[in-house]
Image (cartoon, grey):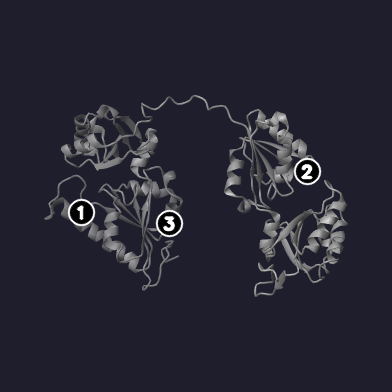
């Protein structure tokens, strides 16, 4: 705070302030951008233009964002529409005014104060700010913050598009000669004419001369409480202020286009089996995100469904984890009735997950016409491997230790075969609340063919806040530290653990010894 309490940021004399040209939009304070509001509230100096009556539209728009203890520089025009006795005439009077304003703002900038120059609409679109920009931007660090233009605001409140497809928009000042205005209007697709006020009758006559008056609109003070919209032909010239414009918008619809449908076509049902990845939005592919967002109904194991943000447009069908066939049939029945259904699956749906369950049920004759697509996801094996380094850098296999859907004898035979083949193993479903002995059994089977020093990675809840990745060896693997949320990666004879400054890394070389 300085002595008078002003909330200014003042830099040392050799560190000048920064100049900001801040666009405020067409008039509604809620159309001020977040960045503009932040700068208005934090700058030490606020500058704005006004006529000699002292009222500033720019300041009134910015008022909700002012801190209340800033230095204000009112830049009051010496003339607006009246005549002047200045030796250089009207333009000479304005040039001297802009030069004097630039000197005033430069004193603040030289003292290290940031200066925000307020500007209605966009600073670089017929904006008053540009006169300061031309005189100061080469001397000081400068930033222009764009704003919603009056043309965009007018089209919005009129509810008509400016341009679409290959159309062009022509923007004109009403101060142009009448014949030039008529020529532009006659050849343009869409037209916006600013700076009305005293030029209104000329602009209206130019639209009439171009044969387009009946399609033109008048918009005054768009987006504000004083907003007025009317057909251009119906407006009394005596009632037109400077802050108004004439607009010839794009047609709402091409007359040659087919009539718009009153109702969407019947939905084509489908089932998308969607891989959510191991955890969280950053692990979700854009294709999976699209499939989830466009679905009418979501089907899946409850905890997996909980990972998809709720959408009141969609219906959610949560089921137990042990009813995969019933879940698949339910999803296909929903699709058969016309719904777009997303069946969610953790990781990749094709790896010990829902894709095969859905496709198996979809082979039934009654579902022959239901499209089924599989949307891949990041697998748990690849996520854990990436956290540790590159243990899957050479040949590897994926095995589930669960004996729920296959006999343990089959699991054991496959573990032995992979161990004999010197493959890296990614081990899914190593344990659960009711299966607590398979990890030790698999470890013992592997030790029949692997060195006790073989690297083992235990990845738990990778991608979630509870993530834990540990590196141990096959001989020291403690089954008590493994549960259903874990995935194990058991290295081959060539897998290495290498100490680095930021921690150990595990990788399997791509080249296998002859």
Quarter location, residue 388: bottom right
Give whichever of discs 1 and 3 has the lower sequence position.
3
**Mark 1 → mark 3, Cα distance in angstroms:** 28 Å
Residue 330 position by quadrant: top right
Q: Against 278, is 323 above or below?
A: above
Q: Position of residue 91 (x, y in %)?
A: 17, 52
- Give me the disc on residue 94: 1
Q: Nearer the viewer, mark 1 or mark 2?
A: 2
x, y percent for residue 28: 40, 42
Q: Which residue is mark 2?
A: 321
Structural crowding at the residue carrying mark 1, measured as other residues with C-alpha within 10 Å and reported as few (<14), some (14–19) or many (≥20): some
The residue tagged 3 is: 39
Q: Earlier in the sequence, mark 3 or mark 2?
A: 3
Within-10-Å neighbours for mark 2: few <14, some 14–19, many 20+: few
Picture residue at 44% right of the left edge, 55% below the top: 41
Badge 3 marks a residue whose secondary structure is helix
Return the x and y of residue 325 as percentages of the image width and height.
77, 38
**Is label 1 in contact with label 3 (beta carbons under 8 Å)?**
no
Image check: 30 left or right of 333? left
Q: Quadrant of residue 244?
A: top left
Is residue 406 in view?
yes
Which image quarter is the C terminus in?
bottom right
Structural crowding at the residue carrying mark 3, measured as other residues with C-alpha within 10 Å and reported as few (<14), some (14–19) or many (≥20): some
The CA span between labels 3 and 2 is 53 Å
Q: Residue at x 24, y 38 (%)?
A: 197
């Amino acid at each position: 705070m300085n002595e008078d309490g002003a909330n200014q940021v003042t830099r040392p004399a050799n560190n000048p302030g920064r100049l900001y040209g801040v666009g405020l939009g067409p008039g509604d304070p809620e159309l001020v951008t977040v960045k503009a509001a932040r700068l208005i509230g934090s700058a030490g100096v606020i500058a704005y233009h006004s006529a000699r009556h002292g009222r500033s539209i720019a300041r009134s728009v910015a008022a909700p964002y002012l801190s209340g203890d800033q230095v204000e520089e009112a830049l009051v025009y010496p003339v607006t529409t009246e005549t002047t006795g200045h030796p250089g005439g009207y333009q000479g009077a304005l040039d001297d005014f802009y030069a004097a304003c630039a000197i005033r703002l430069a004193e603040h900038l030289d003292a290290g104060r940031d200066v925000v120059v307020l500007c209605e609409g966009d600073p670089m679109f017929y904006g008053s700010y540009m006169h300061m920009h031309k005189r100061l931007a080469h001397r000081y660090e400068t930033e222009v913050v764009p704003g919603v233009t009056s043309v965009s605001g007018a089209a919005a409140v009129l509810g008509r598009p400016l341009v679409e497809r290959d159309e062009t928009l022509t923007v004109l000042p009403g101060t142009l000669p009448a014949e030039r205005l008529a020529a532009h209007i006659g050849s343009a697709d869409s037209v916006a004419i600013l700076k009305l006020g005293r030029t209104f009758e000329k602009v209206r006559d130019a639209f009439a001369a171009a044969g387009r008056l009946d399609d033109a609109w008048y918009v005054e003070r768009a987006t504000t409480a004083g907003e007025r919209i009317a057909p251009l032909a119906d407006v009394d010239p005596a009632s037109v202020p400077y802050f108004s414009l004439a607009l010839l918008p794009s047609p709402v619809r091409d007359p040659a286009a087919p009539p718009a449908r009153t109702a969407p076509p019947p939905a084509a049902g489908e089932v998308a089996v969607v891989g959510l990845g191991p955890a969280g939005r950053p692990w979700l592919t854009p294709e999976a995100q699209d499939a989830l967002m466009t679905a009418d109904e979501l089907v899946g194991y409850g905890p997996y469904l909980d990972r998809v943000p709720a959408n009141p447009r969609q219906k959610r069908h949560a089921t137990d984890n042990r009813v995969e066939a019933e879940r698949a049939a339910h999803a296909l029945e929903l699709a058969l009735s016309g719904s777009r259904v997303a069946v969610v699956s953790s990781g990749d749906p094709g790896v010990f997950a829902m894709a095969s369950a859905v496709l198996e049920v979809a082979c039934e004759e009654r579902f022959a016409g239901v499209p089924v697509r599989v949307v891949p996801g990041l697998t748990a094996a690849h996520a854990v491997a990436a956290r540790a380094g590159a243990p899957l850098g050479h040949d590897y296999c994926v095995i589930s230790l669960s004996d729920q859907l296959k006999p343990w004898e089959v699991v054991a035979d496959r573990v032995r075969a992979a161990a004999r083949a010197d493959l890296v193993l990614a081990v899914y479903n190593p344990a659960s609340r009711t299966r607590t002995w398979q990890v030790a059994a698999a470890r013992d089977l592997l030790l029949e063919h692997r060195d006790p020093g073989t690297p083992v990675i235990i990845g738990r809840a990778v991608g979630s806040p509870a993530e834990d990745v540990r590196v141990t060896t096959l001989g020291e693997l403690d089954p008590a530290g493994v549960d259903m949320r874990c995935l194990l990666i058991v290295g081959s004879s060539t897998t290495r653990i290498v100490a680095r400054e930021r921690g150990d890394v595990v990788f399997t070389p791509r080249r296998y010894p002859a």
